[in-house]
Image (cartoon, rainbow, N blue to C red):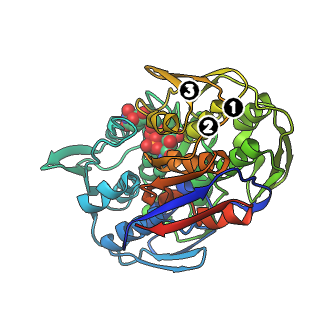
């Protein structure tokens, strides 16, 4: 496939209604969880994005069959007889390591390539390993491959996570459901995607309580008592927040449909603090603004704090606000690469370790810029929509990882942009 860019003509506004896809960060883990059901499961509301294709390959490599019909995914894990995930897949997508927990739950063993570093920090997996070790898993590393075994079986335990890591909580959950006895995960991640995963696991026969709180309890069940299921993925709060940022940027009104507003409480408060009006109903949120953007201070934190995955989009808003904002990144150690790209478009940003001091400017200028990660890429396209002149966004493979038909959805809201082959 030839390399593509997104070319954006500036000075546009975004208004109207857009349907939000299922959450990428949920669907990937729900797919991994089907391994525990040992049969044909159906997942609805699965986004059409490249990360889902990679997870499909991961499952196929293990021996599953995966078929898609629109937003429905049919995964049959009955024939899975391997527990090996190769480096080619883990290096393409770090979330491939989500199969570690369910493979251990199903086979008591797994061989998963170690993920390397990634552009938004070291992103270690030490907490995944410490937690699983407490359940009785033994880890060895052989030429870059993590080899998990359970010489004395998998046994429930009381685990306190050092940090409420999303991935560690999920891997722990998917192993503990098949352990002997009771497990408590303290300081667990509280993201809506964790709740979605627990809902699906419970519908497969698992016994989990407390999802969404910082202490989750799991009563282990026999693997053979688990069964396949049919489950609908929750809406993607980050995609919704990205489009809302677009509405905040150009004034709206812009409505996102297919999202539970309670997933975005802190972000909605920050939109309001920046001078936007928010109207929320059961599955939709409308944003509008008729005053200049006000500056605000933001610090990213685990849910229900402000999400790191909306940090770039809010940095863009702050870059055009009437005053000085400070954004503090607490979740990932190196997630300000976006700032350098935005500065190429005329933003005034000073970086001090994990703080960004953003002095609002009157306007941005279109420029060639590069997506440094998924969320930064999406925010750069939004920047192009309000900037003067043309913006060309490179490295858009990052955007395709997590946003279904981003260009089509933005066009339907009034943006003037297109994908072009290089
Ligand atoms: C998930 C999301 C990602 C989001 C992040 C935080 C998926 C596929 N990705 O990533 O979009 O930005 O949650 O909301 O769901 N850490 C360690 N050791 C560990 C585990 C994590 O040091 O064993 C560190 C990480 O390097 C990072 C921080 O903890 O700095 C948060 O990581 P974590 O919550 O695990 O995020 P992910 O599950 O990787």
Task: Determine the residue located farthest toward the front in the rendered image.
Answer: 389
Circle 1 packing at 10 Å, graded few (<14), some (14-19), many (20+), is few
Q: Distance between the residues labelled 1 and 2?
A: 12 Å
* Mark closest to the chain's N terminus, 3 or 1: 3
Q: How far apart are marks 3 and 1 (CA)?
A: 11 Å
In terms of image quadrants, where is residue 230? Answer: bottom right
Q: How far apart are marks 2 and 3 (CA)?
A: 11 Å
SS for dot 1: loop
Circle 3 packing at 10 Å, graded few (<14), some (14-19), many (20+), is some
- Residue that appears at 60% across and 62% down: 406
Residues tagged 2 and 3 counted as in contact (Cβ below 8 A): no
In terms of image quadrants, where is residue 318? Answer: top right
**Residue identified by numbered label 3:** 348
The one nearer the camera, 108 or 83, is 83
Q: Which quarter holds ligand 1?
A: top left
Q: In this view, does 381 lie to the left or right of 241?
A: left
Q: Is residue 36 left or right of residue 41?
A: left
In terms of image quadrants, where is residue 308? Answer: top right
* Mark closest to the chain's N terminus, 2 or 3: 2
Discs 1/2, front: 1
Q: Residue 362 carries which label?
A: 1
Q: Position of residue 146 (x, y in %)?
A: 22, 49
- Residue that appears at 31% across and 42% down: 136
Residue 183 appears in the picture as rendered: no
**Residue identified by numbered label 2:** 316
- Residue that appears at 54% across and 60% down: 7
Quadrant (top left/top right/bottom left/bottom right) for the N terminus: bottom left
Q: Position of residue 52 (x, y in %)?
A: 47, 65
């Amino acid at each position: 496939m030839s390399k593509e860019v997104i070319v954006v003509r500036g000075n546009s506004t975004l208004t109207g209604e857009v349907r939000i896809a299922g959450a990428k960060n949920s669907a990937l883990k729900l797919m991994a969880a089907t391994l525990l059901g040992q049969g044909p499961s159906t997942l609805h509301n699965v986004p059409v994005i490249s990360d889902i294709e990679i997870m499909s390959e991961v499952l196929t490599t293990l021996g599953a069959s995966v078929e898609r019909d629109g937003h429905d995914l049919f995964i049959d894990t009955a024939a899975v007889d391997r527990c090996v995930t190769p480096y080619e897949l883990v290096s393409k997508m770090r979330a491939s390591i989500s199969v570690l927990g369910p493979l251990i739950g199903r086979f008591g063993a797994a061989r998963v390539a170690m993920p390397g570093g990634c552009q938004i920090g070291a992103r270690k997996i030490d907490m995944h390993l410490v937690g699983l070790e407490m359940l009785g898993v033994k880890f060895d590393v052989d030429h870059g491959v993590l080899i998990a075994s359970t010489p004395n079986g998998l046994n429930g335990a009381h685990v306190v996570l050092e940090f409420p890591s999303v991935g560690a909580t999920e891997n722990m959950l998917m192993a503990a459901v098949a352990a002997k006895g009771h497990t408590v995960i303290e300081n667990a991640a509280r993201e809506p995607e964790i709740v979605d995963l627990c809902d699906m696991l419970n519908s497969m026969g698992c016994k989990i309580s407390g999802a969404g709180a910082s202490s989750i309890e799991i009563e282990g069940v026999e693997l053979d008592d688990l069964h396949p299921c049919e489950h609908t993925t929750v809406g993607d709060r980050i995609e919704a927040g990205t489009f809302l940022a677009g509405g905040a940027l150009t004034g709206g009104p812009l409505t996102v449909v297919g999202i539970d507003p309670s997933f975005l409480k802190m972000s909605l408060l920050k939109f309001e603090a920046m001078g936007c009006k928010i109207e929320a109903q059961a599955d939709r949120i409308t944003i509008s603004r008729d005053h200049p953007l006000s500056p605000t201070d933001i610090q990213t934190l685990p849910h229900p704090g402000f999400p790191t995955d909306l940090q770039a989009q809010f940095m863009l808003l702050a870059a055009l606000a009437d005053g000085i904002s400070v954004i503090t990144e607490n979740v990932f150690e190196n997630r300000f690469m976006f700032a350098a790209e935005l500065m190429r478009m005329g933003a005034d940003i000073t970086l001090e370790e994990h703080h960004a001091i953003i002095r609002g400017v009157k306007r941005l200028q279109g420029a060639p810029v590069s997506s440094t990660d998924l969320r930064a890429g999406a925010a750069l396209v939004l920047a192009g929509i309000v900037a003067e002149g043309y913006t060309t966004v490179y490295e858009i493979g990052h955007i395709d990882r997590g946003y279904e038909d981003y260009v089509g959805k933005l066009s339907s809201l009034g943006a003037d942009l297109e994908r072009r082959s290089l």
